[in-house]
Amino acid sequence: MTRKQPFKKPIYVTRPLLPDLDKFNQKLQEIWNSQWLTNNGKQHLELEHKLQQILKIPYLSLFNNGTIALIVGCQSLRLSGEVITTPFTFPGTPHVLTWNNIKPIFCDIDPVTMNIDANKIESMITPQTTAILGVHVYGTPCNVIKIQEIADKYGLKVIYDAAHAFGVEINGVGIGNFGDLSMMSFHATKLFHTAEGGALLFRDHNLKARVELLKNFGIKNEEEVVMPGINGKMNEIQAALGIVLLDYIEQERYQRQQLVETYRRYLKYVTGISLMPEISGVISSYQYFVIRIEQELFGCDRDYVHKQLKEYNVFTRKYFYPLCSDYPHYKYLPSSSSTNLLVANQVAKQVLSLPLYGSLNVDDVERICEMIIEIKG
Ligand SMILES: *Cc1c(COP(=O)(O)O)cnc(C)c1O
């Protein structure tokens, strides 16, 4: 059998969306003219307002990155003690708890959505628990209804790491409306970005003033500093990049949707491969396209496919592997034991994130699928 030719140029898992440079230059000219570079300038206000509408959320506060946003989010809700979260996430999620002097308690994940398993949360609650921190992994929403029910029953706060969930809606409701607050990341690798950046999304009017103070050193006015805040401000250049990029998001999403449909068509019936769930009523973020490879059925394991694809010049990512509960800082926590995290340990060995970005062609995706099938042999 003749093997497929490798791609001439490397295909990476993602590429940052970049606007037409002239359009960005025009914005830079505006900023230069205004001589206002940060602290709630014109670009900042405009981006905040536009995102509020696009994401269908009453309150949105911009940040210099998603991690600082989530650190401030925990502070704004005065979380302490223990917070129940998922080990199947980016390192930033549990680290934010650690930076708040909060102990992360890892809960196992749902085998289908790969998000925190709402049915297992209750058994992890102790008198120290103050909140549940869910992650909408790959943009798939957590079981937001069940999680809120548990939180209400025990008087807990609910926060979401919605870094993957830009534009996700459940039956027309913006994803940021669930829980007490949600964080979004606008890092360069995210669908919508400001090179580095992020936001907190929430509905409670009372939270707004506290979040604004916390992200600007607690400075209330020239003479009053009312709390120990941090510097979480997004600057005008970041905000301007975001404003310009907003004009490209719909097109990018459309192109990614075509690619995802191609992946699905080709890989749906391949024995040993399972695809990310499609949930009715949910608008997807098209942030990642992730498959799971079951070694027993597929014939070889995820690591082998990952390595072989490199031979074809295709660079996939084992996203999320290893689990956060296996990092040196967390692995001795009782909740990190592999018996507590059976599903998460299995899923982490199976997942492979495939290339997905708007400038990739449908032909390229077809070729990547054929390569995967060829590796299966
Ligand atoms: C990107 C990401 C973050 C971190 O966001 P930054 O803006 O890079 O600080 C946190 N959690 C998840 C799930 C992410 O993907």
Image (cartoon, helix red, strand yellow):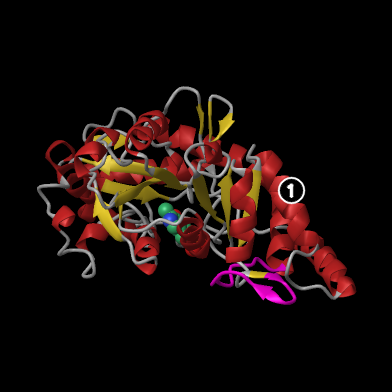
Residue positioned 58% across, 47% down in the render: 201
Q: From the top left corner, tell me how far across and down residue 75 is, in percent.
A: 47, 60
Vertical side of 126 occupied by 281: above or below: above
If the image is split into quadrants, where does the C terminus sit?
Answer: top left
Dot 1 falls on a residue whose secondary structure is helix
Residue positioned 87% across, 67% down in the render: 30
If the image is split into quadrants, where does the N terminus sit?
Answer: top left
Vertical side of 30 occupied by 86: above or below: above
* Left or right of residue 370, residue 254 in this image: right
Q: Which residue is mark 1?
A: 49
Location of residue 216 by image quarter: bottom right
Q: For this rendering, which residue is in front, 60 or 268?
A: 60
Point out the stretch of residues depicted in magenta: 220-235
Q: From the top left corner, tell me how far across and down residue 172 is, in percent.
A: 58, 26
Q: Main secondary structure of the magenta part?
A: loop
Q: For this rendering, which residue is in front, 103 or 50?
A: 103
* Left or right of residue 166, residue 318 in this image: left
Vertical side of 104 occupied by 377: above or below: above
Residue positioned 69% across, 57% down in the render: 242
Mark 1: amino acid:
His
Q: From the top left corner, tell me how far across and down residue 185 is, in percent.
A: 53, 56
Q: From the top left corner, tell me how far across and down residue 145 is, in percent.
A: 40, 29
